Amino acid sequence: MTKLTCGHQHLGRTTPIPAEDTFILAVYPEIVQHHELWKGGKPFISQGYEANSIRIVNLKDEFSARVTHPHVGISFYIPRSVLNNFSDDTGDRRVADLNCPPGLVDPVLGHLAASLLPMFERPEEVCSLVVDHVALAVCGHLQSTYGGLVSRRPMARGGLSPAAEARAKDYLASSAREDITLADVANVCRLSRGHFIRAFRISTGLTPHKWLQRHRVEKAKALLLETDISIAEIALVCGFADQSHLTRVFTALVGSSPALWRRERRPRWASDQ
């Protein structure tokens, strides 16, 4: 997943990309007046794009671009092995190709691409659990919408067993890293990623990332009440990137900043930190 910002200094032909069996999904969050994609050294797609429109190509041929106007795009690099692994994980058949008219407006992919923008702005706060969710959602949408696949797998009805739920929560809670993946947690429960995600949501009502955020905020609350260590220290102890990261998540979930929350419950605490 890459944010491509093409300014005036990037106008002109790009370096050709060597051929490989990989899909490139381009999502344009804003209007692009005109853009050209070249295949085998010749113009292939030449047009403008509306906001939230997409383009999908397979790099089995050598591609390059001719950038004619400044624009921003979100690019998803999806090797065929990734799509195959996703299909195997969900129990669906593998798709042969992804077919989509260039410039089609896709609100679902537009929303998923937009969810990545804050991560590009603050990469130090990126959680791999969120990236995994976006990647799986993109693969699922591409497979069903542009791969001609109608899933035949039954919908999950049950959640995790009590033992599996406990293992998942313990693993999430014990990790102070942001690079923990859904595959890591699923493996602890001896489940596929797809099965684990559905079952965890049924059991807890939350995604693993949302559960982890709430857990870390509850841990921060306890430290705010029971200790005098600074909010910056609490942020690191609880697995946040820094104090501002803790403040954003805490405020979103609790409705006030950590400093205000602490002062309201401990009047003697005068510092905003």
Image (spheres, rainbow, N blue to C red):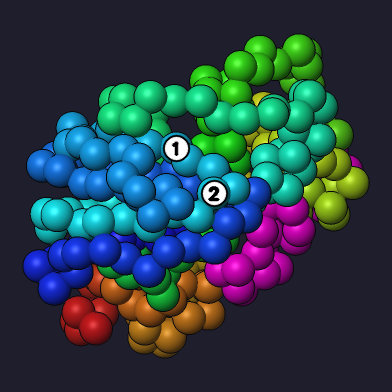
Q: Is residue 41 above or below residue 120?
A: above
Q: Which residue is mark 1?
A: 56
Q: Using a 10 Å C-alpha cutoff, classify the residue at mark 1 as few (fewer than 14 neighbours), some (14 to 19) or many (20 or more).
A: many
Magenta stretch bounds: 162-184
Is residue 62 or residue 206 the one in the foreground? 62
Q: Using a 10 Å C-alpha cutoff, classify the residue at mark 2 as few (fewer than 14 neighbours), some (14 to 19) or many (20 or more).
A: some
Magenta segment main secondary structure: helix
Q: Which amino acid, by three-letter code, is at mark 1? A: Ile
Circle count: 2
Residue at x-position 85% and y-position 34%: 161
Would residue 223 appear left or right of 272 to someone viewing this image? right
- Residue 64 lies within the magenta run: no
Query: Residue 14, how many percent across, how many down?
Result: 32, 65
Q: Is residue 151 above or below residue 6?
A: above
- Residue 171 lies within the magenta run: yes
Q: Secondary structure at mark 1?
A: strand
Is residue 190 or residue 251 the one in the foreground? 190
Which of the labelled discs sits on residue 61, or is there none?
A: 2
Which of the labelled discs sits on residue 182, or is there none?
A: none
Is residue 138 or residue 94 the one in the foreground? 94
Residue at x-position 52% and y-position 20%: 145
Q: CA distance from mark 2 to mark 1?
A: 13 Å
Query: Residue 226, how many percent across, how many down?
Result: 48, 75
Query: Residue 269, how many percent across, how many down?
Result: 26, 79
Q: Which amino acid, by three-letter code, is at mark 2? A: Asp
Query: Residue 141, how many percent across, how many down?
Result: 53, 28
Counting residues from the start of the chain, the first of labels 2 and 1 encountered is: 1
The answer to whether residue 196 is seen in the rendering is no
Q: Where on the picture, by quarter, is residue 45? A: top left
Q: Secondary structure at mark 2?
A: loop
Residue at x-position 70% and y-position 16%: 151
